[in-house]
Amino acid sequence: MLAGAAAVSQLQAQVNGLSTSVASALNTQAESGYGLDGSTGTALFTVSGSGGPISVNSSLTEQNLGAAATAAGVPGDGSNAAALAAIGNNQNLDASLPNSTPVEAFSEITSNFGTVVQNANSNQQQSAATVQSLTQLQSSITGVSLNDQLTQLIQYQNALEASGRAVQAADDITTYLVQNLS
């Protein structure tokens, strides 16, 4: 179980790392562009430094979105938007998943998560079968009913007492016959 929990924690760290890397790359590119209002330096996302949640920058507007142009004075050429889109093809955005585009890296993480879940299900089924087998084994060992055993013991004790009485009666008869026939 610990191995599964460790694997899930590792996958969670990879997702956090990938999302932080992609958001940072997008922010860097967006901040270098100019908005329709001529502003620059506006990030797309708010990225927590501790691997926390990533959210869309609340101060972002249609006018200050740095996707409109790459140079001041040329509003609306869309060149920075193309550069933002090209980030999707960049490899090595996240060092933990080298030579992978963001989509490929996320697919790998998703696949790994599926493998962890499949292994956990398999281990759970195997554990359930083991528990069932052990329960059956325990039942076969401890399946002796104490009530049945006590009943049989009383029956044997009664038979032994009856045998003792029969032997005593035979002894008494033999003694009587020996004394009276002589």
Image (spheres, rainbow, N blue to C red):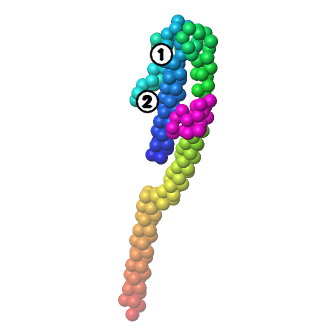
Left or right of 112 in this view: 159: left
Q: CA distance from mark 1 to mark 2?
A: 22 Å
Write down the region rendered in magenta. Answer: 89-110
Examine the rendered structure and indicate whether residue 58 appears above or below residue 170. Answer: above
User: Which residue is depicted at the point 58% across and 12% down?
Assistant: 68
Specify the quadrant of the image occupied by residue 83. top right
Q: Amino acid at mark 2?
A: Gly
Q: Nearer the viewer, residue 31 or 170?
A: 31
Q: Is residue 21 visible?
A: yes
Q: Position of residue 144 (x, y in %)?
A: 47, 59
Residue in front for this viewpoint, 4 or 69: 69
Indicate left or right for 144 with 80 as reference. Answer: left
Give the quadrant of the C terminus. bottom left
Q: Nearer the viewer's eye, disc 1 or disc 2?
A: 1
Residue type, label 1: Gly
Mark 2, secondary structure of its residue: loop
Q: Can you identify the residue that label 2 sits on? A: 51
Q: Toward the viewer: 131 or 66?
A: 66
In percent of width and height, residue 112 lies at 57, 40
Q: Report the disc number at residue 41.
A: 1
